[in-house]
Amino acid sequence: MSSSVRDRPQPDRLLLFTTVLLCAAGLIMVTSASVAFAYTQHQTAWYYAERQGAWMLIGFAALFVLQRFDYRRLRPLAPAGAVVAILLMLLVLVPHVGVTINGARRWFEAGPLGTFQPSELGKLAFAVFIAHWVDRNAQNMGDFQKALTPFAAMLACVLALLMLERDLGTAIVMVGIFLSAYWAGGGRLRHIILLLGLLGLGMIAVTMVEGYRVARLTSFRNPWADPLGAGFQATQSLYGLASGGFFGVGIGHSIEKYGWLPEAHTDFIFAIVGEETGLIGTSLVMLGFLVFGVRGYRASLRAPGTFGVALAAAITTWITFEALLNMATVTNTLPITGVPLPFFSYGGTAVATTLAAVGVLLSIARYGTGPTLGNNTNKETNETSDRWRRDRRAPLSGARGRARSSG
């Protein structure tokens, strides 16, 4: 192999291969889980599968374009992207413009492709913006007033907008996106703990003011206390997972999808995966997200600058944290939050935006430097990765800064 070929930036083939496998499995499961509901609602068993496939093609087109695009050129677009996302999220709240589904107003009509959800696009836009902001404020990340205060204000504005849309699940994921970028960019652990405490109190408050959220919390503790009422979805989900056993009942042979399990092809598709493919299938899905997370955080550690470090951490946390939340919800480990399973749950905007984000992550991995962190001779990269391996014993931000500059 010539030296020019060796020196050319190479993609992370394992990350790409894992994404393709997860998407392929997701499309199969959406097709299987939605056939009954699609036929009763739209008189064709392929209604949701066709739209999911179309959105997936759009997403893969974006992925292959963005993986060849230098992610650093996204920085000048970050503020404008965040503003556009905020405007679209505000626009869905306008009567007769946004679409209300199950009491929540989060969507626009997207013609033959179904609906468009701006908050999904906002995940990527805000990930790019917060990575850009962290990079610009890298020297002040340990300062309470210069870093934590404006960061908390930005996060509060985004969360308030999501609460107006009644989208608690996306709000929780957005917290993960923001905090992971803040942490990867050099934010102090005690500041993050303080912010998490305040967010926890806020979550309790927004839960108490909504009756349906209180009902979800109550049924989470013992769904079998009201198996035909508030605990119906949780119990049916657990029945589906349990009936799959070790090997599953076979692709297409689920019973729960025939009107027993609500949202079988969207938020609770993991229960259908468990029913039809058993413990083996669910374990493989979890393994896929584990591999994705390892490769994503590896790209973050190897990124050649703070912007890439923070952006890769935000995207990886978004996808893996969302998957973890969904699986915890389906297994009744956590209360129902309405979080989809990435690459699997039906939702055009979600799958297309997630694949576009993977394209950005692949671009960051492509420009990563050095074979390993320990042997990396690139000073800028080592200093950046040290933010993940920071000396937490330094009592002052200045001490941390001097430690970095001297390393």
Image: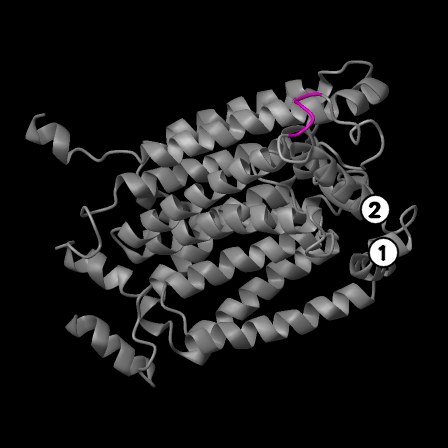
Residue 114 point in image, percent of width and height: 70, 26
Q: What residue type is labelled 1?
A: Tyr
Q: Name the residue under label 2.
A: 103
Disc number lying in front (1 or 2): 1
Residue 277 point in image, percent of width and height: 63, 30
Q: What residue type is labelled 2?
A: Gly
Residue 263 point in image, percent of width and height: 76, 36
Circle 1 residues within 10 Å: few <14, some 14–19, many ≥20:
few
Q: Residue furthest bottom?
A: 395
For the record, the magenta segment spans 248-252
Nearest to the observer: residue 360 or residue 370: 370
SS for callout 2: loop
Q: Name the residue under label 1.
A: 212
Circle 2 residues within 10 Å: few <14, some 14–19, many ≥20:
few
Check contact, mark 1 vs mark 2: CB within 8 A. yes
Please say whether residue 75 is visible from this viewpoint: yes
Location of the N terminus (image quadrant)? top left
The residue located at (17%, 33%) in the rendering is 8
Q: In this view, does 234 lie to the left or right of 211?
A: left
Q: In this view, does 109 lie to the left or right of 352?
A: right
Nearest to the observer: residue 360 or residue 5: 5
Compared with 200, 348 (above or below) is above
